[in-house]
Amino acid sequence: MDIQSLRNEIDHIDAEIVRLFNRRMEAVEKIAEHKKQNNLPIYDSERERQLFDRVATLAGAKTESYVRTLFSVITDLSRSYQGRIIHGKSETALRIEKAIAETPQLFPQKATVACQGAEGAYSQIACEKVFELPSIMYFNSWENVFGAVEAGLCQYGILPVENSTAGSVNRIYDLMAKYNFSIIRSVKLKTNHTLLANPGVKLEDVREIISHEQAINQCSVFLRSLKDVKITYCENTAVAAKIVRESNRKDIAAISSRACAELYGLNILSDSIQTSENNYTRFICISRKTEIYPGANRTSLMMVLPHKPGSLYRVMSKFSALGINLTKLESRPIPGREFEFMFYMDLECSIYSPAFTQLISELEYSVESFRYLGSYSEF
C-alpha cells in the first residue's frame, strides 16, 4: 500500500474512534446523572484500576503502555465531564463571575500600597507605574507586604516575581502558599543597575559591595571582573544605597538604581552593570479581595497534583484541549511532604471566554488542591 492509502485507512479509523468516544461520553453522562441522584462520588479508584488492567490486557505487550496513557486521558476527561454535569460551574468559577460584576470599571488611581525596602526601591518605581497617586508604606520583608495586605493595613501590595536574567523569585512563590490575596495587575520594569559609592570613592577603592541577592545575581558577570571584593546581601537595593550613605565608608559600594544615586547623594562608579541589557523584572500588584478589571487576559493558579505518574501531563492536556496558552509553570516543594510539589501556573486567556470558565471548573474538580490567584492585565 502507498502512503496515501495508509493515511486514508487512518482517517477511517479516526472517524470510528470519534464515533465510539462520543458513544462512551453519552454513557458517562448517564452515569453522572445516576451519581448525582444517588449522591455518589465522581472518582472511583477501584473502578479505574480495573479499567486500566483490562485495557492493558486487551492491548497486549506491544502497546500496553500507550493504551494506559490513552485511557488515563480518557478517564480524566470523563471525570471532568461528570463534574460539569453534577456540579455545574465550580465555586471558583462562580466567584470569578461575581468579582467581574462587582469590580469597578476603572482601575484605582489612589491607594495605600505596601512595598518592600526603602524610598527609591524598584518596587516603588513599579508601584508608581501601576498607580498615579500611591501612598506608599515600606516594609522590611516581602512577607510583611503579604501580611499588611491580608490584614487590611494596606489596600494593595507590590512584589517582584521574576527577572529575565536571574529567573523566578522563589521566596515569593513560597509565601504565596501562606497568605490570602488576589493578583489584580502585573507590570514589567526594565531594571538598570548602577554601582554607587560615597563622593570621592573610586572603583579601585571598593572592597565590599552590598545589594539584594537578585540584583547581585543579575550583575554576576560584572562582579566576577572585580578582584578581592566581598559580596554582602541585604534586603533591598534602595536599602543598600542607604546603608552606604550612612556608613560614610570609602571602601563600600551598593548595586542600586540611578534614582537612588540622586536620592541618597551617591556617585555612580559604573552604570548599566547588569549582565543583560534587556534586564526586566516582573512585579505583581496584590489585593485582599478578588478584583478583576476589564481586559484581564492573564490568570495565575496554584495547585497540588496527585503524587503519581501522569498527573501533570493530564493537567497539561486540558490546556491543550481548550486551546489555552500556558505561559509559566513553576514548581515549589511542599514543606513536610517529601518529593511533593505545589505547581504555579500563568495562562493567557480572556476571562470572558467559555473555555476559561470550563478550564477553571475542570481543574477544581480534578486536582488534589486548587487555588485561584487572580485574573489581570499586564503592561
Image (spheres, rainbow, N blue to C red):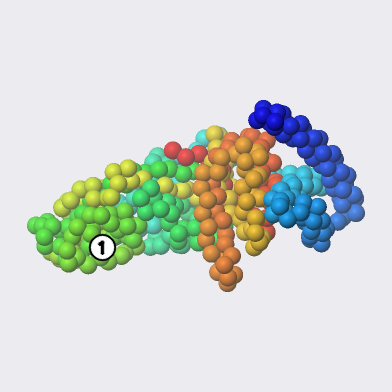
Work out which quarter of the rendered image holds the C terminus and state it.
Answer: top left
What count of labels does the image hold?
1
Where 60 sits versus 356, above or below? Answer: below
Q: Is residue 12 above or below residue 272?
A: above
Q: Which residue lies furthest to the front in this view?
A: 1
**Measured from the top left, where is residue 340 in percent x and y?**
59, 65
Is residue 153 in view from this perspective?
no
Front-most of 130 and 283?
283
Dividing the picture into quadrants, the one containing residue 201 is bottom left
Could you tell me which residue is drawn at 66 percent across and 40 percent down?
321
**Between 75 and 379, which is closer to the camera in this rendering?**
75
Residue 180: quarter of image: bottom right
Q: What residue type is disc 1 on?
A: Ile
Label 1 neighbourhood size at 10 Å, few (<14), some (14-19), many (20+)? Answer: many
Horizontal arrangement in the rendering, residue 226 relative to residue 326 (left or right): left
Q: Where's residue 156, x and y in %?
A: 48, 50
**In the figure, is residue 266 to the left or right of 12?**
left
Residue 290, visible in the rendered structure: yes
On the rendered structure, is 27 left or right of 94?
right
Depth order, front residue of 24/319: 24
Residue in view at x 31 percent, y 64 percent: 234
Identify residue for label 1. 210
Q: Is mark 1 on a helix, strand or loop?
A: strand
| Residue at position x 59%, y 70% in the image | 337
Q: Which residue is at 35% across, 50% downward?
A: 165
Q: Quadrant of the N terminus?
A: top right
Residue 330 picture location, percent across and down = 51, 54
